Image (tube, rainbow, N blue to C red):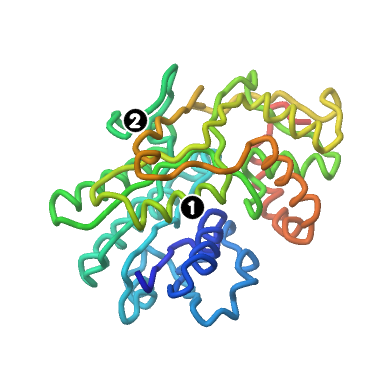
Amino acid sequence: MTHVLVTGGSGFIGSHLVRLLLRERPAMRVTNLDALTYAGNPRNLADVETDARYRFVHGDICERSAVDDAIGGGVDAIVNVAAETHVDRSILEPEAFLRTDILGTHVLLEAVRRHAVARFVQVSTDEVYGDVTDGTSAESDPLRPRSPYAASKAGADLQVLAYASTFGSPVVITRGSNTYGPNQFPEKLIPLFVTNLIDDEPVPLYGDGLNVRDWLHVEDHARGILHVLENGELGGVYNLAGANLRTNREITERLVALCRRDWQTHVRYVADRAGHDRRYALDCAKARALGWRPGRAFDEALETTVHWYRDNEAWWRPLKSAAFKAYYERQYAGRGLR
């Protein structure tokens, strides 16, 4: 491949993927199509802006003209990382998720047909499988989404697979577990808790804090996407997880300790969110058979992540703006945070 279009490349996972492609594939050109919504941040890729192989296009994946402009004279592959992603926001404003995750994916799939793109990678989530009481979810398991976010991502996945069956579209899907690391917008658990703790503010721990997630470092996630892009079987689905199952309480305990704060002072149990899945866990045998494995040890990578936010306040402080504070107040009003 010589030219890849990454949609949502200015976001968290997308920016790490763009940087990885440019760093480790020296013959490759990368175009980044991003609408620069609240979670899309041009500063995430400030270090590659002068690279002649990199091109940025400001546009929405729901708009055919923007997608065609980004494809330009042609691309070998499209990796769709553009999405509305936060479950809490999907409960407050589900329509935005339907538009980006479902309509946007449809527009991209049509562009794959129109421009004869050789490969399309849909970056999805473990949340499409729904709550997993025990064991792990395999790629062949039924989709049982339980939040508007998970439903929008499941709808996108089904479109992708339907285009493969109906039109022979050259598609692959990755389903990643909870991802963490530098440059993540401070609404998700780890960056929200770290930045709050740095500011000596309380953190909201949902319910009893015993919901279980598998944690995957963003660099490992980006490498997994790249590996599937280059080696995945067309029509295939690949789970990507870090094999780091932790309760939200365990994560909170670790973050409080790393930030040198006090549990009694800084942790607030708040009313659980509606439809909160109790547990996710992925079977990654297919990805391992393909040759991918996560490389980051969780405890070390979590500590490094905390240090990154401590050392890069100039990156995240502007993001916790008046608009963010309005969302935060709306999200936690009446739930016992204060």
- Tell me, yes or no, if residue 30 can be seen here: yes
Type of amino acid under label 1: Arg
Q: Which residue is mark 2?
A: 138
Q: Which quarter of the picture shows residue 103?
A: bottom left
State which quarter of the image contains the C terminus: top right
Tell me where residue 73 sits by quadrant: bottom left
Give the residue pinned by disc 1: 223
Q: Residues within 10 Å of mark 1 (few under 14, many from 20)?
A: many
Q: Which amino acid lies under the numbered mark 2 shown in the image of this protein?
A: Ala
Quadrant placement of the N terminus: bottom left
Mark before the other along the chain sequence, 2 or 1: 2
Q: Looking at the image, which residue is at 26% across and 44% down?
A: 158
Secondary structure under tag 1 reads helix
Q: Give percent across and percent down for residue 199.
A: 84, 44
Query: For numbered disc 2, what is the local secondary structure?
Result: loop
- Which residue is found at the position 64% from the left and 45% from the top? 187
Along the line of sight, which residue is nearer the eye, 43 or 292?
A: 292
> In the shown orientation, is residue 59 left or right of residue 238?
right
Residue 329 visible here: no
Side of 311 where 104 appears, left or right: left
Question: Residue 330, how many percent across, how many down?
Answer: 65, 41
> In this picture, is 73 found above or below 44?
below
Q: Is residue 262 above or below residue 302?
A: above
Q: Relative to 33, is 253 on the left or the right?
A: right
Position of residue 310 relative to residue 135, above or below, is below
Q: Nearer the viewer, residue 302 or 230?
A: 230
Spot occupied by residue 168 in the image (x, y as percentages of width and height): 15, 56
